[in-house]
Image (spheres, rainbow, N blue to C red):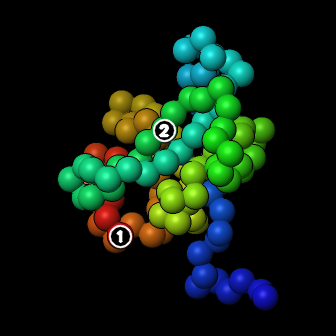
C-alpha cells in the first residue's frame, strides 16, 4: 500500500544535529558506547512527558531505529505516541536543547517537554 501525503510516517526521525549532540552528550557523560532511548510517560502540564535516556542496551520489546549512525530505541507503548516525530536540537542563546516535533500532539506546553493527544 502506498503512503499518501496525509498519512504520518510510521517511524521516528532524528536530525543530524540532534544525533551529533546525543553522541557529544554520551561522550561527556563517560558513556561513549551508549544508545539513546526515547519514551513517553504520564505527567507534565499537558498530560504526557517525553523521556530521553542513555542506555547500555535496549529492552527486548524496543523498536530500534538507526538514523545518522545513531541507534535509537523506543518502547512499544511510547511508539504509538511518537510515530512520525522528528527529534531535533535547538542551540544558541534561546535554544531549548532537544526538541520533539510530534505530529500526534494536539496540545503542548511552553517548555516543549509535555504534550497531549
Q: In terms of image quadrants, where is residue 48?
A: bottom left
Find the distance from the CA under tag 1 to the CA under tag 2.
19 Å
Residue at the spot x=39%, y=37% of the render? 95
Quick one: quadrant of the C terminus?
bottom left
Q: Position of residue 9 (x, y in %)?
A: 64, 71
Helix, strand or loop for disc 2: strand
Can residue 67 be seen?
no
Residue 93 picture location, percent across and down: 36, 30
Q: Residue at x 38, y 38 (%)?
A: 96
Q: Is residue 16 above or below residue 107?
A: above
Q: Nearer the viewer, residue 55 or 92?
A: 55
For label 1, the residue is 117
Report which quarter residue 51 is drawn in.
top left
The answer to whether the residue labelled 1 contacts the one labelled 2, judged by CB atoms less than 8 Å apart, is no
Pointer 2: what residue?
Answer: 52
Q: How many C-alpha atoms fall within 10 Å of the one at disc 1: few (<14), some, or many (≥20)? A: few
Amino acid at each position: 500500500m502506498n503512503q499518501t501525503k496525509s498519512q504520518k510516517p510510521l517511524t521516528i526521525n532524528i536530525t543530524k544535529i540532534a544525533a551529533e549532540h546525543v553522541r557529544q552528550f554520551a561522550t561527556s557523560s563517560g558513556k561513549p558506547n551508549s544508545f539513546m532511548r526515547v519514551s513517553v510517560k504520564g505527567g507534565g502540564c499537558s498530560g504526557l512527558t517525553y523521556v530521553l535516556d542513555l542506555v547500555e542496551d535496549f529492552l527486548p520489546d524496543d523498536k530500534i531505529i538507526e538514523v545518522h549512525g545513531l541507534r535509537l530505541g523506543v518502547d512499544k507503548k511510547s511508539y504509538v505516541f511518537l510515530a512520525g516525530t522528528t527529534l531535533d536540537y535547538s542551540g544558541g542563546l534561546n535554544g531549548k536543547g532537544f526538541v520533539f516535533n510530534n505530529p500526534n500532539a494536539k496540545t503542548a506546553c511552553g517548555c516543549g517537554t509535555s504534550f497531549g493527544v
